[in-house]
């Protein structure tokens, strides 16, 4: 409120003293012609300054609310926190297969990583978790019992965690009860190793059985060839080559020796690989139909139609429970009956769809498993084909060389060929027997994946975290900053004017100046308070004097006599600015200045100068009194005031007939300057009539009160009505900020 708002006996003498323009007052840009800046650039970008302005306006409210929400959020997290216990079993996954006597084939880093990943997926596969979930003691665990799809949930919760970069791994599971976590981890590891043992041991036994069958066949062939060699040797030499003291000489024919060795090696590799293929085909045939109910249930649960139907049943059940709590007799309520009917119908449909989809899922799973095994068999067949082609080529070359040697040496070489054939079969027999021995020996070698330690109570003595610090910090931070976020969002919506730059962008008008906040009377007896208030009055007067200077020095406003002061809405400092601007113009020019209160709906000028409200402008326009009778000349030495009066008719009727324009032309012959305090543009349409009758208009905005949308609308209405807004002023600048921005140049002080 201006110093003029106080009774004249309480006004500081310097507030109405006839002083000239303030030396050192800040200069303001000259308003352009018409005052309008032709730009349509939006000013709604949210930057750092916008956030700071929003926080400055709301921190007094947001801080206690944020502290309250932070305390409530922290308390909820703390008192609802249930400790979680983690159980772990230790296993070892070796990078290379262990052996007793025979060095295994080398395996690269990629193969080792693939093996570890295979064990990880096997641990969380339905083949391992399905039997675990079928156990009654496991199914009663609260976390699993609360899940509609326990298999999927357990797959996500169970972890195989590497310990550093070693071969050690931990099987981890967390539960609210330590005994449940221990029981489930041990059940999973037992099922995991049982599945691995059954698969690998069965396949190894099958390979050994097939190799033994081949060894027996080779043994019969060796016996037949020995008899042939014995017969041919006796016919040629008369001696039995296999009696004590006789040795079978090795084959001497070149190049058959080298071909023979390669042929034997290839033949043995083919026999072993063929045994592995037959073993895999046998296991694939046995497991082709072994699709567990858990796998089928999991596939059915993942179907989008099943999931959508289950969600609909759950929603209808929730609605039914809510409806049952609101009525006294649910059985007679039509809504409850309809919901019950829908639930029963959906459950019947769900059962039928599960049966139908279960058969399809079983067929799809069997097809997928068959395709996977067929790929593995295809790889074995491809390797076997390569070995067969190699053996065939070596055999053809061997026979070719053999025929050439036979033609060159005659029938005497027949014995050597028989001996070579016997040697070949004997070597194949020995290699197969050695491979069987190797496989049987390595069956007793340590497993590649071994269980080092089961989960027990000694490892689960304390929860994973005694206090949920992370959740507490997150809840406290969210609770504290939520009000500030809402404040920023609200300010983003209402878009208040907080600085001169924002006012200029939103109004498209040049900002003539920032007006220091008018101090108010405070209760207290401190000696510093009156001094601070007087300094605030001086800053208020200086800021308005600077605006008056900018108006007077503007070249295109030299002929200006009537100035309208308006605003978009109420409570934007328009009346205080108009009153002090009239005083400033009167002091500077030394000529009478007339201040007209044009707000016939809510007048305030008579309160500022402590004069009667009537007679005034309303009586003059209705020709009840003359202008001289209505003007109060005792309000100020050079400022005469025409109060609003008491309107007995609509302000539109009083101002819309041209009576105000006619009287204003006569007024300008008497007064050098006329300042018209108009009502808000958006609230009262007659404000446009008053502003259009004036030579220029100034739009007032209040810092942190005026809204950008209202300022834009008011500026457009003024331009559309043919008014001449020459600029805008921003009221309500704190004295401290005003001094910091423009400096302080005291004068007239003791």
Image (spheres, helix red, strand yellow):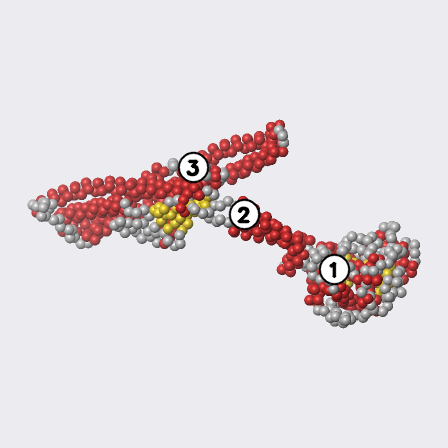
Q: Nearer the viewer, residue 475 or 620?
A: 475
Residue 589 point in image, percent of width and height: 84, 69
Q: Which residue is at a point 45% across and 47% down the rendered structure image?
A: 462
Q: Which residue is mark 2?
A: 78
Q: Secondary structure at mark 3?
A: helix
- Please tell me whether mark 1 sits on a helix, a strand or a loop: loop
Q: Secondary structure at mark 2?
A: helix
Task: Judge depth for marks 2 and 1 and give the one in front.
Answer: 1
User: Residue at left 39%, top 54%?
Assistant: 165
> Is residue 505 visible in this depiction of the protein?
no
Q: Nearer the viewer, residue 610 or 499?
A: 610
**Classed neighbour count for the residue bearing mark 1: other residues with Cα under 10 Å, few (<14), some (14–19), many (≥20):** few
> Is residue 231 toward the left or the right of residue 14 in the image?
left
Dot 3 crowding, Cα within 10 Å, few <14, some 14–19, many 20+: few
Q: Who is closer to the viewer here, 111 or 684?
A: 684
Q: Which mark is residue 524?
A: 1
Residue 380, image quadrant? top left
Q: Residue furthest left?
A: 238
Nearer to us of marks 2 and 3 is 2
- Sequence order check: which comes first, mark 1 or mark 3? 3
Q: Tell us which disc is closer to us: 1 or 3.
A: 1
| Label of residue 137 in the image | 3
- Expressed as whole percent of the image width and height from the top left, the position of residue 698 reads 78, 61
Residue at 32% across, 49% down? 97
């Amino acid at each position: 409120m201006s110093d003029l708002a106080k009774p004249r006996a309480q006004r500081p003498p310097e507030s109405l003293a006839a002083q000239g323009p303030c030396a050192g007052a800040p200069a303001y840009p000259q308003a352009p012609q018409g005052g309008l800046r032709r730009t349509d650039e939006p000013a709604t970008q949210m930057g750092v300054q916008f956030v700071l302005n929003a926080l400055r306006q709301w921190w007094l409210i947001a801080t206690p609310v944020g502290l309250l929400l932070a305390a409530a959020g922290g308390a909820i997290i703390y008192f609802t926190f249930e400790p979680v216990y983690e159980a772990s079993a230790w296993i070892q996954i070796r990078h290379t297969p262990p052996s007793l006597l025979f060095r295994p084939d080398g395996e690269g880093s990629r193969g080792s990583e693939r093996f570890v990943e295979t064990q990880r997926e096997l641990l969380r596969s339905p083949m391992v978790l399905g039997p675990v979930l079928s156990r009654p003691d496991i199914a009663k665990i609260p976390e699993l019992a609360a899940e509609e799809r326990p298999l999927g949930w357990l797959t996500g919760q169970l972890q195989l965690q590497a310990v550093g970069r070693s071969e050690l791994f931990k099987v981890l599971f967390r539960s609210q009860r330590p005994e449940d976590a221990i029981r489930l981890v041990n059940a999973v590891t037992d099922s995991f190793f049982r599945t691995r043992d059954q698969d690998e041991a069965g396949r190894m036994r099958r390979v050994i059985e097939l190799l033994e069958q081949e060894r027996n066949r080779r043994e019969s062939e060796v016996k037949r060839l020995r008899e042939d060699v014995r017969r041919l040797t006796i016919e040629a030499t008369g001696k039995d080559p296999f009696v004590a003291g006789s040795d079978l000489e090795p084959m001497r024919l070149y190049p058959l020796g080298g071909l023979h060795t390669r042929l034997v090696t290839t033949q043995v590799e083919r026999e072993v690989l063929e045994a592995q293929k037959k073993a895999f085909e046998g296991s694939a045939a046995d497991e082709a139909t072994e699709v567990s109910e858990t796998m089928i249930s999991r596939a059915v649960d993942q179907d989008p139609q099943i999931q959508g139907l289950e969600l609909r049943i759950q929603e209808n059940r929730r609605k039914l429970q809510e409806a049952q709590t609101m009525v006294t007799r649910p059985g007679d309520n039509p809504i409850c009956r309809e919901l019950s009917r829908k639930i029963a119908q959906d459950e019947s449909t769900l059962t039928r769809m599960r049966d139908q989809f279960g058969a399809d899922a079983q067929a799809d799973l069997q097809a997928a498993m068959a395709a996977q095994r067929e790929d593995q068999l295809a790889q074995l067949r491809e390797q076997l084909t390569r070995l067969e082609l190699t053996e065939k080529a070596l055999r053809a070359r061997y026979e070719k060389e053999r025929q050439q040697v036979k033609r060159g040496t005659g029938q005497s070489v027949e014995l050597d060929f028989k001996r070579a054939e016997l040697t070949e079969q004997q070597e194949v027999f020995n290699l197969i027997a050695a491979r069987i021995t190797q496989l049987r020996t390595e069956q007793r070698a340590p497993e590649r994946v071994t269980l080092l330690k089961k989960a027990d109570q000694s490892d689960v003595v304390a929860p994973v975290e005694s206090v949920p610090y992370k959740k507490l910090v997150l809840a406290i931070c969210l609770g504290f900053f939520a009000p500030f976020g809402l404040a920023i969002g609200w300010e983003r919506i209402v878009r208040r004017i907080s600085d001169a730059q924002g006012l200029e962008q939103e109004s498209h008008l040049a900002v003539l100046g920032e007006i220091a906040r008018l101090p108010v009377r405070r209760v207290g007896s401190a000696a510093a308070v009156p001094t601070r208030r007087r300094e605030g009055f001086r800053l208020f007067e200086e800021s308005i004097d600077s605006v008056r200077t900018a108006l007077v020095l503007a070249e295109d406003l030299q002929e200006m006599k009537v100035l309208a002061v308006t605003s978009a809405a109420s409570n934007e400092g328009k009346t205080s600015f108009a009153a002090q601007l009239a005083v400033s113009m009167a002091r500077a020019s030394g000529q009478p200045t007339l201040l007209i209160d044009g707000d016939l709906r809510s007048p305030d000028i008579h309160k500022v100068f402590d004069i009667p409200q009537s007679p005034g402008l309303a009586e003059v326009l209705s020709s009840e009194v003359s202008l001289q009778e209505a003007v109060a000349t005792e309000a100020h030495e050079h400022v005469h005031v025409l109060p609003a009066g008491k309107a007995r008719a609509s302000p539109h009727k009083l101002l819309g007939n041209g009576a105000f324009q006619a009287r204003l032309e006569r007024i300008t012959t008497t007064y050098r300057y006329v300042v018209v305090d108009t009502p808000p543009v958006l609230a009262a349409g007659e404000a446009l009539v008053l502003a259009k009758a004036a030579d220029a208009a100034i739009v007032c905005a209040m810092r942190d009160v005026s809204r950008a949308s209202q300022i834009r609308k008011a500026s457009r209405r003024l331009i559309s009505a043919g008014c001449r807004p020459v600029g805008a002023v921003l009221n309500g600048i704190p004295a401290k900020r005003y001094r910091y921005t423009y400096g302080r140049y005291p004068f007239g002080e003791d």
